[in-house]
Amino acid sequence: LLASADAIWDLESKQVVHELERRREGPGPVAFSPDGSLLAVALERQAIKFWDVASGEVLRTFAERPDEVTFSIEFSPDGALLATGVHGNIVRLWDVEHGQVVGTLGHEGERHDVHDLAFSPDGEVLASAGNDETVRFWDVASRQVLHTLRQGNGLYGVAFSPDGTLVASAGCDRTVKLFDVASGRLLRSLPHADEVMSVVFSPDGLLLASGGYDNQVYLWGNPR
């Protein structure tokens, strides 16, 4: 299956399985739960809706501040938590079952935004990237910052390697940066011709893909 802000698609038949009501709200980020049973959709300035993938029905709605802009959403690997990055440099942690905020994390500066989030494969660490020029690693259990990495410019994307030892960031400074998670040490800086918007590791961790405003997708071999 493939999801957009207003539909769930079957990739084999290329047909819409469910149309999701969007009205005139602007699109926003979407995320499947790890077991594939739920789809979280954050429309522009709207509460987050949880759709049942099998039936296409809304199961519940999450709203701390319904009018705030949500830039990123990410389920924890066990599906128990949903992390949201919103305008005002805030990360919220939600209890998926009960729809309650169980943690609020902050970057520096109220005028910045958290553009991307990534849980470590074991679910113990959450990385958040924003245009305050930092990647922050949060201990999910204690809600405390483990360490902060400075990119030197705003950030759009962040991703853990499948084994959880590396993190990649996508920056406005036209680079992808690779960090060692344990030490926070910068390992590599990979150049783009323009701002980088997104990064993702292949499932085996041997390739890193990045894309940005230069209209190119880069495939990087041997990310270490």
Image: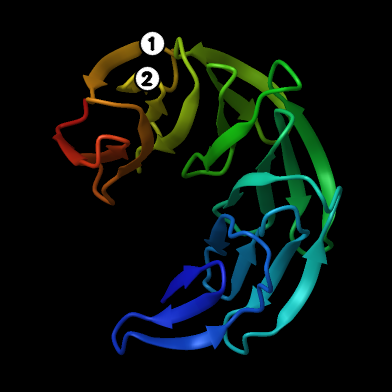
Q: Position of residue 120 (x, y in %)?
A: 49, 39
Q: Earlier in the sequence, mark 2 or mark 1?
A: 2
Q: Which residue is mark 2?
A: 180
Quarter residue 185 falls in = top left
At 44% from the left and 19% from the top, the residue drawn is 182
Q: How many marks?
A: 2
**Label 2 Cα crowd, 10 Å radius (few <14 / some 14-19 / many 20+):** some
97 horizontally vs 5: left or right: right
57 horizontally vs 60: left or right: left
At 52% from the left and 77% from the top, the residue drawn is 7
Give above or below for 45 relative to 185: below
Quarter residue 164 falls in = top left
Say what amino acid the circle numbered 1 marks.
Answer: Arg
> Among all residues in the image, which is located at the extreme front?
24
From the viewer's side, name the closer residue of 64 and 208.
64
Secondary structure beneath dot 1 equals loop
Give above or below for 117 relative to 64: above
Q: Position of residue 205 (x, y in %)?
A: 25, 42
Q: Are marks 2 and 1 in contact (CB under 8 Å)?
A: yes
Q: Which residue is mark 1?
A: 185
Give above or below for 181 relative to 68: above
**Label 1 Cα crowd, 10 Å radius (few <14 / some 14-19 / many 20+):** few
Quadrant of the image containing the N terminus: bottom left
Q: Position of residue 23 (x, y in %)?
A: 69, 74
87 horizontally vs 213: left or right: right
Say what amino acid the circle numbered 2 marks.
Answer: Asp
Secondary structure beneath dot 2 equals strand
> Among all residues in the image, which is located at the extreme left?
221
Q: CA distance from mark 2 to mark 1?
A: 5 Å
At 76% from the left and 50% from the top, the residue drawn is 94
Quadrant of the image containing the C terminus: top left
Kindly identify which numbered label has been placed on residue 200: none
